[in-house]
Image (cartoon, grey):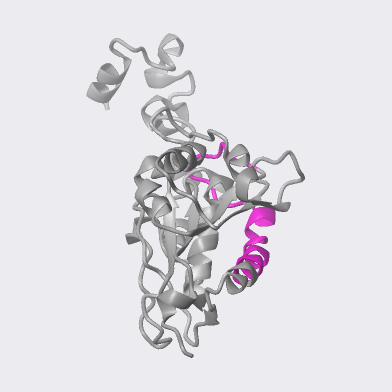
Amino acid sequence: MKTDDHEATPSILVLGIGNVLWADEGFGVRAVEALHQRYTFAEAVTVMDGGTQGLYLLPYVQSCECLLVIDAIDYGLAPGSVHVVRDDAVPSFMGAKKMSLHQTGFQEVLAAAQLLGWQPQRVMLVGVQPSVLDDYGGSLRPEIAARIDEVIRLVVDELASWGARPELRSQQSPEHGSQHSPGHGSHRGPGHSRDHQAPIAELAPSALALHHYENLRPSPRDACRVGDPRFLARDLGHPDGAHGDPSREAGSERDGVADSVAKE
């Protein structure tokens, strides 16, 4: 007897988390974007760019029966190593991993969901050992980006065993992996429509789409990723420091910024 999609497939959440502004920290987001570009799934499957939303992800986690998370995880392995953790072992690997005091680690999201009665059928974490996490504005390192295809194959095989019915899209975006990044908790990716010719819905707003982020961003020098140009001698043209006064090269908390701006 034929059953409908929701009866045949448990509610599944595929969640990519991380922060694309910090180099390899963005792996989970970029991997789930690429997954969304390539595959559709059963209606009961939600693919989400979770970014750095922390506790805002709690209702999505609570509402799923099966959870698959993709993230950059420090396992203490060689950079680029792919490691899978399942079920009760997952929370201990999620860690606090906060990039700011305002972020909530996903470990806390899982703990909160369980305190509220969440009892998932399956939980799986696919983690990739990062190489660099402290390069603000940096890209995934090549050895980390090279693991996206491997992780997608692993995830698709696992989801198939969960009844998610993955199918390759017949038409993929030319901007491979260009769906968008952290933080807006957008949901309903593949599975929104089984029409493979329909436009691929965005996972999130386009400000940090991969093709923009990698090809249209300013150079590290122009983006001033290493300091404020008002205090850099190379930009001001004074070899001895800001405005030619070595004692004020770094400005001051009290009046350095205001005085420097006034003289420009």
Percent of width and height locating residue 92: 62, 37
Instruction: Work out which residue is located at the far bottom of the displayed protein and give it.
Output: 1
Residue found at the very far left of the displayed protein: 262
Boundaries of the magenta span: 132-156
Q: Is residue 178 above or below residue 182?
A: below
Point 47% across, 45% down: residue: 21
Q: Measuring 62% from the left and 40% from the top, which residue is drawn there?
A: 93
Residue 216 visible in this rendered orientation of the protein: no
Q: Is residue 98 visible?
A: yes
Q: Is residue 136 magenta?
A: yes
How far across and how far down the image is residue 51, in percent?
43, 49
- From what the image shows, is residue 229 above or below residue 29? above
Residue positioned most to the front: 1
Kindly indicate the quadrant of the structure image that contains residue 178.
bottom left
Residue under the image location 42 percent in, 60 percent down = 48
Q: Is residue 255 left or right of residue 105?
A: left
Exactly how many numbered labels are in the figure? 0
Extreme-right residue of the structure:
78
Q: Is residue 135 above or below residue 263?
A: below
Give the left or right position of residue 227, taking residue 95 as reference.
left
In-front residue for pair 146/3: 3
| Nearest to the observer: residue 178 or residue 108 | 108
Residue 257: give x, y in percent of width and height: 30, 20
The image quadrant that residue 236 belongs to is top left
The residue drawn where x is 66% and y is 66% is: 154
Q: For residue 32: magenta?
A: no
Location of residue 11 in the rendering, given as x and y in whole percent from the top left corner = 44, 65
Q: Quadrant of the C terminus?
A: top left
Is residue 230 rendered to the left or right of residue 210? left
